[in-house]
Every structure is written in C-alpha cells, then in structure tokens.
Amino acid sequence: MFGKDWDILLGIAAKTLPVSVREICNYLKIATLSYRNAEKFIEENNLDKYIKNDAFSFKQGESFTLLYNESLPEKELRIAILHEVAHIVTGHCDTENDSFDGRCTTYNKVDGKEGDEVEEAAYNFAAKLLSPACVLWALKVRSHKEIEELCLMPRRFARMRADRMEELYKKEKHLLAKEGKTCFLRSRHERALYESFKPYIQKLREER
Ligand SMILES: [Zn+2]
C-alpha cells in the first residue's frame, strides 16, 4: 500500500514535469489497454457496460488491468488513468463499494462527480501525482495556467492544485513569520523528491 503520492514519484525516480503516466503504471505493475486494443478482451470478460467511462480497472485475483479511452485529449487521459491508479493503490478496490462493484471500478469521468468522497479522493490523489507541491513551490508557480501547461493536466484540476498551493503559501508565510521555517520539505520523502527534481528546477529557473 502506498501512503503518499511522493512514494510513487520516488519509485519512478521522477525528475521532470510532466510526470510520466506510463512509467507510473509500469512501476506499479498495472497492465494498461486502450479500448481499441481491448475489443476482444472486453467482449470475453463482459466488460461492455464499463466503457462509458473514461477509464476503468478490472480486477482478476490480485492483479488489475486498467482500460482507457484512447480518444480522450492527452491531458484528460492522463488524469483519467491516474484516477484509476489512485483507486487501486489507495485500497478503494479492496472491497465492494460505490466506486468498485467487486470486479471493476464504476466511475471515472473528467467532468467530475461532485460530492462523492471516494471519487474526489481519487481525483485529488491523481492531481497530486501530476503536480508535486514541492516542485511547484520551488518554481514559485501560482497560476492554474502554468500548472496546466507544466504538468499537462486539465484546467479543472490545475485550478484545484492552484487553490491548494495558495493555501500552502499562506501557511508558509505564517510559519516563516512565527518560526522562520517553511512548511515545505519537512518530511524525508518530500526532501528526496525535491533533490530528484533539483537539476530540472534549476534549469527552469534560469530560463524563466
Ligand atoms: Zn472513480
């Protein structure tokens, strides 16, 4: 079980943005198949009803096949796949629930399902994977447009991350005034991730 998005990014030794979704799936040993390439697989396993979603995960024993709609725009496809990764690694598919019917995940649409806790948590995890806060912080990124472009993610999720960054910057300001310390890079894992991205951060800073 992976507690943090950082563990996965450290696992793939991520060094640059945008983060590679393929590397994440390979690292987690999640097989991926586009709907187009999975026609036979979908028919054989009776998975037709799930392809209305942008992506879904099919559980067989302890392993998963992640199927996705290859015709989605790239940014949406990235979040759709990582939404499934989130369901798998955070234990949403361990037992039957509203998001998992015992065989497959049941909901994944980039236009969102407001108010559903598990679905929101999956989107949140996916968005965090695509836009690590310590990297955005080191680059002094604030606007959703910059996040959208740097991290290759849909605007809705870039906005969500920009809002989160504002909260963190506020917290940092408060802590700097009170303790002279930032709220970033406090955990060992976050520091390791920052180190991994450091050459990229430096390069981008020089270019900006
Ligand atoms: Zn879902």
Image (cartoon, rainbow, N blue to C red):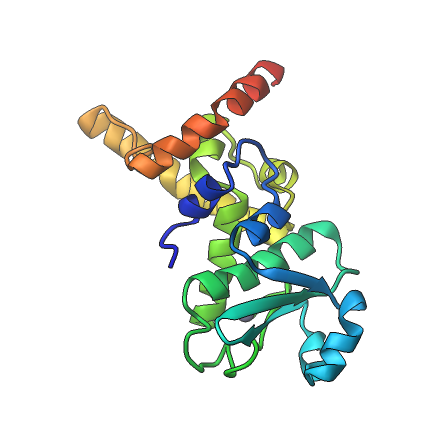
Q: Is residue 175 placed above or below 116 in the rendered structure?
A: above
- Of 32 and 92, nearer the camera is 32
> Compared with residue 182, is residue 149 higher up or lower down, i.e. above or below?
below
Residue 192's place in the image compared with 66, above or below, is above
Q: How many marks?
A: 0
Outermost residue toward the front in this view: 61
**Depth order, front residue of 4/40:** 40
Q: Is residue 35 visible?
A: yes
- Say which of 93 and 147 sits in front: 93
- The picture places residue 99, in percent across and down from the top left corner, at 50, 76
Question: Hey, which quadrant is residue 207 in on the image?
Answer: top right
From the viewer's perspective, is 26 left or right of 174?
right
Q: Pinpoint residue 55: horizontal percent, then vertical percent.
A: 65, 67
Which quarter of the image is occupied by the C terminus?
Answer: top right
| Residue 67 place in picture, x, y as percent | 67, 67
Residue at the farthest left position: 179
Residue at the spot x=25%, y=26% of the render?
181
* Image quadrant occupied by the N terminus: bottom left
Quarter of the figure with residue 151: top right
Q: Nearer the viewer, residue 144 or 48?
A: 48
Relative placement, left or right, of 193 versus 65 is left
Relative image position of residue 179 (x, y in whole percent): 19, 27
Which residue is at a point 62% across and 70% down the rendered structure image?
56
Taking the image as four quarters, which one is ligand 1 found in?
bottom right
User: Where 148 falls versus 123 (above or below)?
Assistant: above
- Residue 114 visible to the viewer: no
